[in-house]
């Protein structure tokens, strides 16, 4: 999937899909001040831009989502779109896609 497809799918599903936040994104670097709920809100509702993840250590098929937090600081989130089967306990339906926040960075 190319970057334009990832961008389209990200903005299409982010308000209704499961968002999974890896512990690395908020626990391994507490000085960055992220919480799991903040990262979910940044992904779900904030405007931002998407670019390729060209890092030498990049997770295969991941991309970068640049977004501003409540204090107007730029945050760089490493996002992965994966197909996972999650059964909704209320409806019994199965979700097919999830956004995974693998890593998060901001200057504090």
Image (cartoon, rainbow, N blue to C red):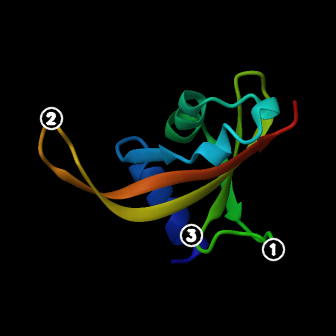
Looking at the rendered image, the disc whose residue lies closer to the viewer, 2 or 3, is: 2
Q: Residue furthest top?
A: 71
Res. 4 mark: 3
Residue in view at x 60 percent, y 44 percent = 23
Residue position marked by numbered label 1 in the rendering: 56
Q: Position of residue 47 (x, y in %)?
A: 61, 39
Q: Residues within 10 Å of mark 1 (few under 14, many from 20)?
A: few
| Dot placed on the residue nearer the N-terminal end, 2 or 1 | 1
**Residue 54, image quadrant:** bottom right
Q: Residues within 10 Å of mark 2 (few under 14, many from 20)?
A: few
Q: How many marks?
A: 3
Residue in view at x 51 percent, y 77 percent = 1
Is residue 102 toward the left or the right of residue 28 in the image? left
| Dot placed on the residue nearer the N-terminal end, 2 or 3 | 3
Res. 90 mark: 2
Q: Look at the picture and state if 26 lies above or below 50.
A: above
Q: Position of residue 12 (x, y in %)?
A: 41, 53
Res. 27 mark: none
Q: Mark 1: which secondary structure?
A: loop
């Amino acid at each position: 999937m190319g970057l334009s497809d990832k961008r389209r799918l990200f903005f299409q599903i982010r308000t209704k899909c499961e968002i999974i936040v890896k512990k690395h994104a908020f626990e391994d670097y507490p000085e960055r001040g992220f919480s799991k709920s903040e990262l979910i809100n940044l992904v779900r509702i904030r405007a931002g831009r998407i670019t390729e993840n060209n890092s030498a250590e990049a997770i295969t098929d991941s991309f970068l989502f640049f977004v501003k937090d409540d204090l107007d600081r730029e945050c760089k989130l490493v996002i992965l779109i994966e197909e996972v089967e999650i059964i909704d306990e209320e409806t019994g339906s199965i979700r097919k896609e999830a956004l995974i926040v693998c890593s998060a960075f901001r200057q504090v």
